[in-house]
Image (cartoon, rainbow, N blue to C red):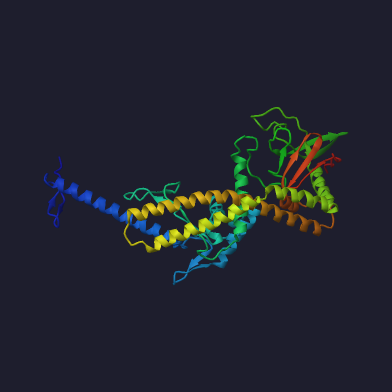
């Protein structure tokens, strides 16, 4: 049996082989642990205090699009910023994260860490990063154990601080919000609570994820059908309810007919032509849709009041943080927690009203886009896929091949998509 090996601490005069030293070791370790906890709490308190004053820490070592000068100033790296703008632009153009990542890899562009291989997860992180609009959400993660230094997502563990205009913006707030709405729309395809619309996002066709069945509500999918006439084969590109096509295991009771893709294309262009010829009807319908989404005068007044109140509370938080000494104080902490809680309650009410206001602004902008587009169209004979993606929110296919186009400006048009002659396979 090997003899025990001890450790002798000369400064403390402690020998681990001495049974009397065990008590001293226990006491010293407890004191060291408490000191570590105290240092951790003070450090955490100091960091939060800076957040309250609007001072944020933003490392740019592996942050695509930004650099830090010798003076500590954050500046835009224009070469990398082009990559960031491209990612946001392609997302709004309808491309998925995986498709964007493949394009960036193919073109040899580098990530923030200098890698030439892009992943869909890396693209999504950039699309959701609020710092690219010049703002910073501080304390996204928190350390929950001062001994292991384990960090987790801050899900209602500690207050978060949203500080505006902390550094130059690479993209506009409008573009960032548009991307968040698009990501939300794609996410809902997979997490629809009614399980009616659940589907994977696709951008193979301009009609992908755009059409839904008017009878059962399920998505309409693309089918490649082959037929024959007088011994000759023909092909058909058609769109049909996935239930009728036998692609939905949870629902079996829908018999909606398919509609030729060419008919959907022609019908869309016919609708645009009708709108250009009857702009007065278009403007009246759009006005009603915008008015329905707009805030009422009392709601608009309340939104202005909330903005004023939130700004006042934020100023009080900043003033309190600036006056407080370097040590923690119970009264200070209680007052600060109350102000932060008050700010969160006001912010929730404000966000609800602001969401409605943004819907109104969105409809107005989309109406302007539609009117400008109609002015530029000279011929309605050929289908334009880019126009469809730009103008249409979704399409609904009913029985008897009736199709409803729901435009992003809130206007709806229903028309019959007539069956056309099947093209011959050559």
Displayed quadrant of residue 366: bottom right
Q: Residue 408: in sight, yes or no?
A: no
Please tell me which residue lies in front, 17 or 171.
171
Q: Residue furthest top?
A: 253
Residue 266 visible here: yes
In this view, 282 is above or below 66: above
- Give the position of the C terminus as an image quadrant: top right
Q: Nearer the viewer, residue 422 or 253?
A: 253
Left or right placement of residue 308 versus residue 405 in this view: left
Residue 113's place in the image compared with 398, above or below, is below
Q: Please tell me in which quadrant of the rendered image residue 215 appears.
A: top right
Residue 339 appears at what percent x and percent y?
A: 44, 53
Q: Residue at x 29, y 52 (%)?
A: 37
Q: Residue at x 22, y 48 (%)?
A: 30
Point out the image quarter for the N terminus. top left
* Residue appearing at x 76%, y 54% in the figure: 370
Percent across and percent down for residue 97 are 59, 50
The image position of residue 352, as x and y in percent, is: 58, 48
The location of residue 189, given as percent across then percent down, is 62, 41
Extreme-right residue of the structure: 230
Answer with left or right where residue 307 lies relative to residue 234. Answer: left
Residue drawn at x 66%, y 50% is: 296
Number of numbered discs present? 0
């Amino acid at each position: 049996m090997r003899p025990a090996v001890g450790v002798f601490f000369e400064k403390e005069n402690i020998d681990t082989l001495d049974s009397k030293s065990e008590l001293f070791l226990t006491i010293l370790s407890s004191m060291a642990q408490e000191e570590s906890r105290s240092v951790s709490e003070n450090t955490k308190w100091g960091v939060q205090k800076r957040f309250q004053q609007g001072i944020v820490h933003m490392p740019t070592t592996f942050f695509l699009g930004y650099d830090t000068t010798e003076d500590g100033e954050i500046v835009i790296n224009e070469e990398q910023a082009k990559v960031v703008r491209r990612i946001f632009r392609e997302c709004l153009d309808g491309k998925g994260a995986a498709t964007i990542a493949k394009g960036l890899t193919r073109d040899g562009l580098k990530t923030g860490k200098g890698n030439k291989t892009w992943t869909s997860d890396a693209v999504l992180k950039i699309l959701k990063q609020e710092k690219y609009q010049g703002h910073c959400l501080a304390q996204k993660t928190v350390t929950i154990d001062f001994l292991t230094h384990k960090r987790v997502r801050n899900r209602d563990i500690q207050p978060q601080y949203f500080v505006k205009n902390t550094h130059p913006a690479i993209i506009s707030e409008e573009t960032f919000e548009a991307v968040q709405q698009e990501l939300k729309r794609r996410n809902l395809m997979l997490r629809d609570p009614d399980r009616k619309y659940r589907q994977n996002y696709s951008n193979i066709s301009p009609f992908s994820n755009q059409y839904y069945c008017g009878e059962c509500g399920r998505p309409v999918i693309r089918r490649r059908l082959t037929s024959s006439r007088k011994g000759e084969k023909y092909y058909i590109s058609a769109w049909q309810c996935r239930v009728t096509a036998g692609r939905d295991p949870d629902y079996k009771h829908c018999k909606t007919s398919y509609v030729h893709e060419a008919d959907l294309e022609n019908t869309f262009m016919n609708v645009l032509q009708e709108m250009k010829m009857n702009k007065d009807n278009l403007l009246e319908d759009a006005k009603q849709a915008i008015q329905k989404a707009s805030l009422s005068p009392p709601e608009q007044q309340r939104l202005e009041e909330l903005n004023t109140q939130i700004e006042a509370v934020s100023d009080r938080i900043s003033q309190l943080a600036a006056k407080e000494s370097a040590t923690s104080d119970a009264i200070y902490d209680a007052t600060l927690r109350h102000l932060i809680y008050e700010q969160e309650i006001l912010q929730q009410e404000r966000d609800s009203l602001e969401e409605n206001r943004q819907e109104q602004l969105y409809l107005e902008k989309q109406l302007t886009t539609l009117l400008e587009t109609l002015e530029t169209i000279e011929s309605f004979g050929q289908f334009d896929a880019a126009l469809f993606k730009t103008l249409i929110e979704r399409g609904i296919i009913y029985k008897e091949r009736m199709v409803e186009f729901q435009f992003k400006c809130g206007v709806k048009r229903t028309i019959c998509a007539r069956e056309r002659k099947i093209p011959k396979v050559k």
